[in-house]
Amino acid sequence: GQQLNQSPQSMFIQEGEDVSMNCTSSSIFNTWLWYKQDPGEGPVLLIALYKAGELTSNGRLTAQFGITRKDSFLNISASIPSDVGIYFCAGEDMEYGNKLVFGAGTILRVKS
Amino acid sequence: DTAVSQTPKYLVTQMGNDKSIKCEQNLGHDTMYWYKQDSKKFLKIMFSYNNKELIINETVPNRFSPKSPDKAHLNLHINSLELGDSAVYFCASSPRVTGELFFGEGSRLTVL
């Protein structure tokens, strides 16, 4: 099945640093979503984006829906230890009946 | 109150057995899903039901049979379990056919 290209695969950063990750696709997406998964838990929705160019914040998190509708990024500012986890992007693929497709995830580790 | 709850959380069984995982959501959502997360953490959709009707059926072996007795429940039955079925299975619900998903905590299935 189709898959989003999510990068980086993993990051190991110092507490207090800013983090940036992104997703790209060859298809045009209606919606971009960003999820975080803690160990032993299900993914939890962080930010949902519905319009091309939209920039949305949720606390220290900021995400943008790319103008071309084929990409999105997520930034985390001033990282803290509880930011550790796996971050997934997901997009609604118009070419596949608006099915939600997930990226492979970015593993974030934070050194305190 | 847990929004999307799955049982059991852990399941260890022998090859060839049949097992079921139950899912219930109290969010009033019309759409429910089953996702499989493999050892590399990749999330892949298996099934989707909208108001008890099957709307997405990915290329999943027919040993997997979902059942939705009402729109708040979506159970997954697996026949003749194989080693490759070992994974974490996530139930999710959504207020509409596509878009934001609310995940359960996952059911870790180990087939020996």
Image (cartoon, rainbow, N blue to C red):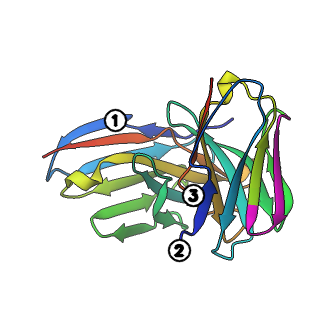
Residue B53 x/y as whole percent: 87, 61
C-alpha gap between disc 2 and disc 1: 33 Å
What amino acid is found at the position of numbered circle 1 in the picture? Ser
Query: Distance between the Cα atoms at labels 3 and 2?
Result: 12 Å
Local secondary structure at mark 1: strand
Residue highlighted by disc 2:
B1
Q: Position of residue A52 (x, y in %)?
A: 52, 63
Label 3: chain? B
The kind of residue on which mark 2 rests is: Asp
Q: Residue at x 75, y 58 (%)?
A: B74
Res. B63 mark:
none
Determine the CA span between mark 3 and mark 1: 24 Å
* Res B15 → quadrant: top right
Task: Please say whether residue A101 is one of the residues in the magenta stretch.
Answer: no
Along the horizontal axis of the image, is A31 left or right of B49? left
Above or below for B39 versus A24: above
Provide residue B106's location: percent of width, then percent of height: 56, 49
Q: Nearer the viewer, mark 3 or mark 2?
A: 2
- Where disc 3 sits, the SS reads loop
Residue A10's label in the rendered image is 1
Q: Chain of mark 1?
A: A
Identity of the amino acid at label 3? Gly
Q: Is residue A98 visible?
A: yes
Q: Which residues are magenta?
A: B62-73
Are callouts 3 and 2 both on one chain?
yes
Q: Position of residue A89 (x, y in %)?
A: 49, 50
Front-most of A18 and B82? B82
Towards the viewer: B10 or B44: B10
Disc 1: CA contacts within 10 A as few (<14), some (14-19) or many (>=20): some
Residue B66: within the magenta?
yes
Which residue occupies the foreground of this view, A81 or B13? B13
Residue position marked by numbered label 3 in the rendering: B104
